[in-house]
Structures are given as C-alpha cells and as structure tokens.
C-alpha cells in the first residue's frame, strides 16, 4: 500500500492518503445522505461560520461576503461548516453554486476542522457569474470533526463572493479516471532529426503486421511500410507494434503517421527545435532564482519580486539560524535556486544540478554562445556559467566554520499553493551538516575551479580552497548522515551511503589539480571498480557515475584510464540493449516495473551515458540510441504527451510549483517553455495521484495536475538532465 511521505504534508494543504477502493471491492454503499445542514441558507446562515472581519450577509437566499484584500493564504479568509461526519473509503459528491468578481478563485475543500487540518479534497475553480460546481472524491479518513469550507484569501484587492446550495452527499459511486490519450499512433511530437532514426509505437489489439503511411503537411503520402508486432509492453500493459520510417529523411513540418485507422499527432523532421530547447532548458534557472528580482523585460509574464531577501512578510535568508540545538551561529545564505516547486534550497540537489550544467559546458563548445537573457548576459563569461555561478555562490555559503556543509535550508513548516517566493511568511532554518552535502560541495567546487579559471581566476581559487577544505572535513566526519525523518517544511534528501560521494569528490579534485593524494583516493575507492551504472545511472543520491563519466571524458593521466572509459561504454551498451528491447524505446527498466520519483530525469540521464559513449567511441549506434531515447519524452509514450512544457502538440502544463500556479490562480503563469515534469512514479505519494491513479501501471502513473507533486513537479536536477541532453542533440543537428 502506498505510504504518505511527510515532505509535503502541511496542516492545511495536504491530505491523508486517499485509498480509493477502485478496482478492489466497492464498500457497502450508504444511502445518499446529505451531510451539510442548511446548505441552501434558508432564512439563516447558521450553522456556517466565517473568519473574523468577514461577516456572512444573506443576499437573495445566498451567503455572500466582502473578502478583504491584502491576505496571503487562501485560508486567511473563509466560510465553512464544521461537525461533518466522514466515513473512510466512502465516496462523496461535493457540490455548490458560487459566484465572485471575475477571475477570483475559491479554494473549496473538505477536510479536518481541527489540527492538523488535513485536506481530503480540494478544487480551486475560477469564479465569475453564478455557476454550479460538482465533484466526487473518496474520503481517505473517517472523522466526526470534518469540515466543508470555501477559502477566499490570498488576494491583494478586496472582492465579493457568494455561495449557495452547498451539499455533501455520501454513498455515490466513485468516478474512474481515464486519461485522454488521443490517437493510438505515438510519435515524437517535436521533431526527428533528418539523418536520425525515426520510430513510432502503435497501440493496437492486432498481433500481425499492419500497413502504415507517412503523410506530409499537404496530405501527400511520402512513405509507406509495415509495422512490427511487439506483444505486450510491460511498462504500460498495452499490446503494441513498432513502426520504423528512418529511411525517410526530408526536412519539413506537419508530418503525420497513419496506421490501423488512426493518425498521429503532427511532428517535424529537422533539428531547429533542439537548439531552442537547449536555450529554454537553461533559461528555466533564472526564474528559479532566489534572492533577486526576476525582470519582466527578460522573462515577459514571469517578473516577480526578489524572494527571501529579508523583506516582510519573508523572514529572509540573510541571517538564518539553525534548527533549535543544531548550531549557535547564523549564516547569510541568500541567493541560489529554489529546488523545485517549493521554496527550499538543498545542497545535494543543487550540487548535482550544477555539475550537470558545468558538464554540459565542458562537453559542448557551442553552448558557450547560447544567450540565456539573464542580467549577466553580455559580460565576457558564457551565460551558462553565469547561471551556474548563481547557485555555486549559494552552495559555498552553506559551508560551516568547520568546513562541513549544511544539508539544506528551508521553511519551518510546509506552505500551501499558490505562494510567490516574496510572500512566504515562514521562518527559515539551517538543517544539520552532512557528509553527503560536504562531499557534494567538494565535487562541484573542484569542478568549478577548472571551469571558471579562464574567466575569473580569483573565483576559481576560492572554489578550489572551499573544495579542499570540504573534502578534508568529510574525511574527519565520514558518517554524518541527513535524517530521513527531517522532512517537515522541506524534502529530506537523506542519503546514508556516501562512498559514491567520496569517489566523485576525489575524482573532481584529481581532475582539477592532478594531485597524487586525490588519485590515490580514486584508485582505492570501492566504487572505482564497481558496476556503478544501475537502473538509473546517477542522481542526487547516487553520484559514483558522475565521477566515472568525468574520469572518462576529461583529459587526465589516471593509471588504468582505458578501463574507466570501457566501463562507460559497457554501461551505454546495457542501456542501449534495454532500449532496443523496449517497444517505446525506453532505456529504463526498474525492478518490478516500479517507476521511480522523477523517472523522466532518470531516463534522460541514462541517455547522457549513451551520449558519453558516442563521444568516447564515435560509434553511430550510440548517437542513434540517444535520438531514439528522446522520442519517449516528446510523446512516443503510453500517455501520448510531451513531458516538456511548450514542446509538442500536447505537453505538461501544470507542473507543481508555488509560483507557476496558473491552475490555481489565473493571474499566475504556467511554468515556462522548456520545463521538464518529474514523470511517471509508481509510488504515487500525493493524494491527488492516489485519488486518480491507484492501480496504475508504470507509464500511466502520471497526471498533469498541479496537486500531483509526486508525479508532476518541476525541479532543478531534472531540468539539468534535459539541458545537458538537449545540448548534445543541438550539437548533432
Ligand atoms: O527528487 C526527490 C526524490 O528522489 C525523492 O524520492 C523525493 C522524496 O524524498 O524527493 C524528491 O525531491 C523533492 C524534494 O524532497 C523537495 N523539493 C521537491 C523535490 C522534487 O519533487
């Protein structure tokens, strides 16, 4: 059974796991019973309550309020009714009529009326003239202290809200969520390279080969052939066939592929899109920045005030104390990037992200010229390095006086959505130092020392001395682990295996200094000869492959370096073999088909390993493998959608974020083009995914909804993978 992770369980926004019994035995149905008393506001507004300063006025038999302006959170102003009985596992229909000044939002919830105020169900419709709203949900917990409420806070200006016919009826049949997956022919909706492989997947009951045809934008058939039956695909549970139209090489837009009576979504043949994507995937970081105003002239529609710079209601990152009892100093940790859709900043995830961007810089000459439209654009440093330095400076500030590095800094308690960074009222806290964070800084600061040397020797020297100091401190404190239970107000990012971080840090220090002490540590590490390329090659917790890749790719004189290179090529062959046997061309086959949190970035990082083999050997099969692997991200998948916002006919739009919360507040934007969604996650830790996706198979464990933080968040490490890979592809084209 799915367990609820504590990392995003705020008293108000989070709900207890919804263990919808869809597919299992349906619970004995109660009669349809109305739980709300006087939902029609007949003669009186009792027993509804409202928050202080916002009296309910009965108007034409409706309940209306003048909502004050200038509040922060939705729950700062509300109308509701308590003492609602809820039965666990029972399905309810929650309905009401509501109106409000156009464009304002009501957060309608059913939840717990007492601490910890769990939310069992929520919807945030945008209001206008009176409309009827009706939703069903399955109660995850039973209580006699339930509540229905209409939360109307969080607006700068005052506005008017009315509600009527509030109803909560139990014993209704549960709704089964069925994703809209469109045509059964699945293609890369962005583009195939003219000289690259071109594969598609057909979902069909047929078990014998079927004819297909490729059509150009004027409707002319330009190629035909027959599909190859592939049987049932484990990752989706679908019977599928594959189509190969690699022989067609003419550049163009608006192609479609037709088979079995279905026509695919349109796609291009050409490389331009990947050049745009390379820039967009990197531009993502500017709008993740903390501690600086985001300029609207640089990112139209995304301008916002600086977050966490000690201006109320922020408590600011300028002078941050530790959690009680953890340390007796404060640190100025302004700056850096927000990790994901939350306002936390975590060293281990920041480090692996910076490493991947600096690695893109080290492997691609052309990325130096890519203009990211950031405040530093036009100085003599490549934009990609200016952007990475924004995070590096923050990482360096997280180093404690004794050389160890604090694991993370974030809010004391989880905040709700939406919430602009500058509006976050929570106290900020430094969490304990850890060996993993310390080595992570050692690795990326050492890498920075060689990368920035040509642009800013003083910074390079400062980074190197911080790296050396961190490495020494970690050797003195080799088993200080971040706690798995430290997940209130921010993610835990716990990791209690650090031989890989030791290896990675020693490798980067060796590559930047050539010193014997570091190469001796590399050679003595158990990771040096181990098979470090698992189902996923590397991520924030597993960093040995990061060290191995750099030892293979960055010129150096390590004894036995040929074996290092060979290990990378062998890993690439392994991922290629998986991809070849996979009817959607995915080089990721997790044990028991349990797709991990952030699976899209895992798939992309495996492709990064294949691209490294291409760089090492020049073998065309590796280049082709990377291109085939990309197709999955852009629509050749069970859900027939692209996971990169703005790329492909249908793409993820509602990634979980407190400031790209358009789905909850129409005045806020969606994430910018080039944002990668986390992707299918079999463990569906969030309540919305549990409500909609319980029982999902692999690729289907994803939903493009802002509330699904376990399948649909945006994050700096995921976009780093996308940036590096799209950079490689842009260079090919
Ligand atoms: O990406 C992280 C994933 O590997 C972990 O399993 C998960 C639970 O600890 O946390 C993910 O990271 C989230 C972090 O904890 C908080 N910020 C958002 C991150 C992306 O979802």
Image (tube, helix red, strand yellow):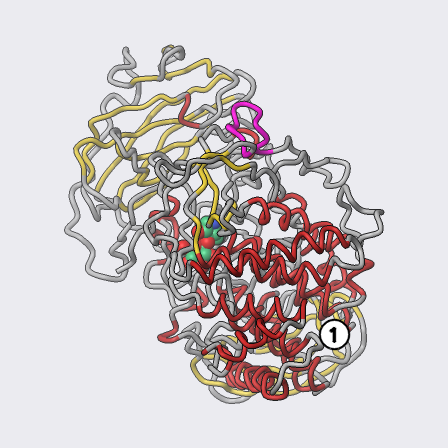
Task: Using the image, determine if residue 715 lies above or below residue 127.
Answer: below
Question: In the image, what residue occupies the spot 54% across and 21% down?
Answer: 101
Task: Specify the quadrant of the image occupied by residue 608.
Answer: bottom right
Q: Quadrant of the N terminus?
A: bottom left
Q: Is residue 439 visible?
A: yes
Magenta segment boundaries in residue numbering = 307-317
Q: Quadrant of the C terminus?
A: bottom right
Q: Is residue 329 magenta?
A: no
**Foreground of the two, 202 or 536:** 536
Q: Position of residue 588 (x, y in %)?
A: 49, 75
**Foreground of the two, 380 or 205:** 380
Q: Is residue 178 visible?
A: no
**Label 1: few (<14), some or many (≥20) within 10 Å?**
many
Q: Quadrant of ligand 1?
A: bottom left
User: What is the count of numbered marks?
Assistant: 1
Direction from residue 549 to residue 382 in the image, left or right: right
Task: Specify the quadrant of the image occupied by residue 516.
Answer: bottom right
Question: In the image, what residue occupies the spot 51% across and 87% down?
Answer: 229
Question: In the image, what residue occupies the spot 64% across and 69% down?
Answer: 188
Q: Position of residue 254 (x, y in %)?
A: 74, 66
Direction from residue 547 to residue 463 in the image, left or right: right
Q: Is residue 312 magenta?
A: yes
Question: In the image, what residue occupies the spot 52% across and 55% down?
Answer: 349
Task: Using the image, determine if residue 218 lies above or below residue 246.
Answer: above
Task: Using the image, determine if residue 490 lies above or below residue 238.
Answer: above
Q: Position of residue 84 (x, y in %)?
A: 21, 30
Q: Main secondary structure of the magenta part?
A: loop
Task: Using the image, determine if residue 147 lies above or below residue 684.
Answer: above
Q: Which residue matches tag 1?
A: 193
**Foreground of the two, 229 or 361:** 361
Mark 1 falls on what kind of element? loop
**Foreground of the two, 642 or 60:** 642
């Amino acid at each position: 059974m799915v367990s609820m992770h504590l990392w995003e369980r705020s008293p108000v926004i989070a709900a207890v796991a919804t263990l919808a019994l869809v597919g299992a035995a349906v619970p004995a149905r109660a009669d349809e019973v109305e739980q709300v008393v006087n939902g029609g506001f007949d003669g009186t507004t009792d027993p509804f309550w409202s928050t202080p300063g916002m009296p309910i006025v009965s108007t034409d038999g409706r309940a209306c309020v003048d909502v004050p302006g200038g509040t922060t959170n939705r729950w700062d102003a509300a109308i509701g009714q308590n003492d609602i009985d809820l039965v666990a596992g029972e399905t309810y229909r929650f309905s009401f009529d509501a109106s409000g000044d156009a464009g304002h939002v009501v957060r309608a919830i059913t939840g717990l009326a007492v601490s910890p105020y769990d939310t069992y169900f929520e919807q945030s419709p945008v209001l206008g003239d009176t409309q009827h709203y009706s939703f069903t949900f399955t109660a995850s917990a039973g209580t006699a202290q339930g509540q229905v409420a209409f939360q109307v806070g969080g607006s700068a200006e005052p506005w008017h809200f009315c509600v009527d016919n509030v109803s909560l009826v139990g014993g209704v049949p549960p709704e089964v969520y069925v994703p809209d997956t469109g045509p059964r022919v699945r293609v890369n909706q962005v583009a195939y390279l003219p000289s690259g492989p071109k594969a598609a997947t057909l979902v069909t009951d047929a078990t014998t080969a079927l004819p297909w045809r490729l059509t150009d934008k004027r409707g002319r058939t330009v190629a035909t052939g027959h599909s190859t039956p592939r049987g049932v695909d484990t990752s989706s549970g679908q019977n599928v066939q594959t189509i190969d139209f690699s022989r067609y090489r003419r550049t163009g837009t608006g192609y479609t592929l037709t088979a079995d009576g279905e026509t695919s979504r349109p796609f291009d043949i050409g490389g331009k899109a990947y050049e745009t994507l390379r820039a967009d995937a990197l531009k993502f970081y500017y709008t993740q920045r903390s501690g600086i105003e985001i300029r609207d002239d640089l990112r139209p529609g995304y301008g916002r005030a600086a977050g966490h710079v000690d201006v109320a209601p922020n408590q600011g990152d300028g002078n941050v104390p530790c959690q009680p009892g953890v340390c007796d100093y404060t640190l100025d940790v302004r700056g850096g990037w927000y990790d994901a859709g939350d306002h936390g900043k975590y060293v281990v995830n920041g480090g692996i992200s910076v490493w991947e961007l600096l690695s893109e810089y080290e492997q691609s000459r052309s990325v130096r010229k890519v203009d990211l439209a950031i405040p530093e654009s036009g100085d003599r440093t490549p934009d990609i390095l200016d952007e990475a330095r924004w995070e590096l400076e923050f990482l360096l500030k997280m180093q404690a006086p004794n050389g160890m590095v604090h694991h993370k800094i974030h809010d004391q308690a989880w905040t709700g959505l939406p919430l602009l960074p500058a509006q976050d009222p929570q106290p900020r806290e430094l969490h304990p130092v850890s060996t993993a964070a310390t080595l992570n800084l050692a690795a990326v600061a050492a890498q920075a020392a060689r990368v920035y040397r040509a642009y800013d020797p003083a910074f390079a020297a400062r980074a190197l001395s911080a790296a050396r100091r961190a490495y020494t401190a970690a050797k003195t404190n080799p088993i200080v682990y971040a706690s798995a239970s430290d997940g209130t107000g921010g993610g835990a990012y716990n990791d209690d295996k650090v031989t890989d971080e030791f290896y990675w840090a020693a490798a980067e220090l060796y590559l930047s200094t050539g010193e014997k002490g570091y190469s001796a540590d590399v050679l003595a590490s158990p990771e040096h000869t181990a098979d470090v390329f698992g189902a996923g090659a590397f991520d924030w917790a597993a960093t040995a492959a990061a060290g191995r890749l750099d030892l293979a790719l960055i010129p150096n004189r390590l004894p036995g370096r040929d074996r290092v290179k060979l290990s990378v090529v062998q890993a690439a062959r392994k991922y290629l073999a998986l991809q070849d046997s996979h009817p959607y061309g995915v080089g990721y086959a997790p044990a028991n088909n349990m797709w991990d949190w952030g699976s899209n970035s895992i798939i992309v990082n495996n492709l990064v390993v294949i691209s490294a083999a291409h760089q090492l050997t020049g073998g065309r099969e590796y280049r082709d493998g990377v291109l085939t692997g990309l197709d999955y991200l852009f629509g050749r998948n069970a859900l027939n959608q692209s996971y990169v916002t703005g790329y492909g006919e249908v793409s993820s739009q509602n990634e979980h974020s407190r400031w790209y919360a358009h789905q909850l507040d129409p005045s806020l934007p969606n994430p910018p083009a080039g944002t990668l969604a986390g992707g299918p996650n079999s463990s569906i830790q969030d309540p919305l995914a549990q409500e909609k996706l319980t029982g999902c198979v692999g690729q289907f464990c994803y939903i493009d909804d802002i509330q699904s933080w376990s399948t649909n968040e945006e994050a700096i490490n995921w976009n780093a993978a996308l940036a590096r890979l799209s950079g490689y592809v842009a260079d090919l084209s």
